[in-house]
Image (spheres, rainbow, N blue to C red):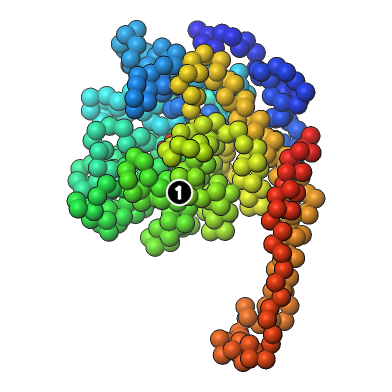
Amino acid sequence: MEFFTEVSERIAYEGAESDNPLAFRWYDADRVVAGRRMEDHLRFAVCYWHSFAWDGLDIFGAGTLDRPWHPTFAATADPMAAAKQKMEAAFEFFEKLGVPFYCFHDRDIAPEGEKFAESAAHLDEMIELAAGHQQRTGVQLLWGTANLFSNARFQAGAATNPDPEVFAYAAGQVAHCLEATHRLGGQNYVLWGGREGYETLLNTDMKREVDQLARFMSMVVEHKHRIGFTGAILIEPKPFEPTKHQYDYDVAAVHAFLQKYGLADEIKVNIEVNHATLAGHDFAHEIATAVNAGIFGSIDANAGDDRLGWDVDRFPVSVEQMTLGMLEILRGGGLTTGGLNFDSKLRRQSIDRTDLFYAHIGGMDTMARALLAASSIIETGDLDALRQARYAGWSGELGTSIMADATLADLHSRAMTTGEPNRVSGHQEMLENLVAKHIERTR
Ligand code: XUL
Ligand code: CO
């Protein structure tokens, strides 16, 4: 049965002058930008959890959104029937919006049963249905992930739990979900450290917990190869929330962890905009850090709020913030197996079914415009030329000898005879104007 009845056709591109709130003004899937179709550059995905599994509940109050399959509705006493109804609505949405991908947690698409085996059977049944929907609509799976944080058994973490029984349970759940992702042709598998962190050192052996986490990740990598899954395994950094200290704090912390445990060639990162902000970083910083480390994988596209210090998961609206991010993505060679997943929530008062369309259309237009601006910055080369000029000295005699074999003593003797180094302007404001110009001229 049709759920999004106010939207009868697929959302179309109508151009920047359009006043139709149900049309794209910037996202033109077939338009070629820097040698690639926009759809292939951006690789948009809708996330199942915020858009379909969440009913608007927050820490102060009950759900507000119209999600009739949600357990709070008496009509959905049969959880599997509700899951099927939810999946139909989800694929109707993906198709009408015209996104190539979606993402899920195991528990978003299949309800948990009494025992592990029952939960696994539920997932298998829903995976069969998802395969049919994917085939019918052409929508593909960007990534799957296991929910290792909602159930009370994970109160003290999954892999980092003080009880090996919980580790073992979580390992079984990931094995099953990774296989399900593989069966659906998923292009990546994500591990977000939901409760992999701690509240107080008074009861926590941090070293032991991080060793456990590494052991878990090694098992995931071994299993990926065992079952022939060729997608990427991605860790999603986040500094805190729900636990006070999360072990996967940011990209740099994840990189250090991967190197220490010999996993840097096997695991990459899924960078979320709002998590970068919470870690005290710019979105672009996290991408550049990952690209430099060779571990850039995928993006959870959303935004924080200037005044709220928690994970508010707004849909992205800032073209400037996203342009700076897209610039780093393009500099790094663009997305490969990764994509832009809208890990974004409607505001609680956006209760019309069509609000989900407005939210995604806005987010997709923001990212598309950012792509155009970033590729125009790269194409004209003005910003890169100025950046390169700033380091010109490093191609000269002094710069090359420092990087080759000069010693501290050599530089000491040299300093005795040379004068004060020349200072030059960093031109930050001029460069910011240049970025603004590229955004303004985006057509
Ligand atoms: C939580 C978050 C998750 C992950 C997947 O902050 O971002 O939704 O993306 O578990
Ligand atoms: Co996320």
Q: Position of residue 426 (x, y in %)?
A: 69, 62
Q: Nearer the viewer, residue 229 or 40?
A: 40
Q: Position of residue 183 (x, y in %)?
A: 45, 33
Q: Position of residue 341 (x, y in %)?
A: 54, 35
Q: Nearer the viewer, residue 335 or 175?
A: 335
Q: Is residue 379 above or below residue 51?
A: below
Which secondary structure lies at badge 1? Answer: loop
Visible residue check, residue 272:
no
Residue at (61%, 87%) from the top-left corner?
411
Please name the amino acid that badge 1 sits on: Ala
Label count reads: 1
Residue labelled with disc 1: 279
In the picture provided, is 177 more to the left or to the right than 427? left
Residue at (69%, 40%) from the top-left corner?
371
Q: Quadrant of the C terminus?
A: top right
Residue 393 quadrant: bottom right
Residue 150 quadrant: top left
In the picture provided, is 296 more to the left or to the right than 395? left
In the picture provided, is 284 more to the left or to the right than 208? right
- Queried on whether the Cβ of the residue with tag 1 lies below 8 angstroms from ligand 1, the answer reads no
Q: Position of residue 237 (x, y in %)?
A: 44, 47
Q: Is residue 414 above or below residue 215?
A: below
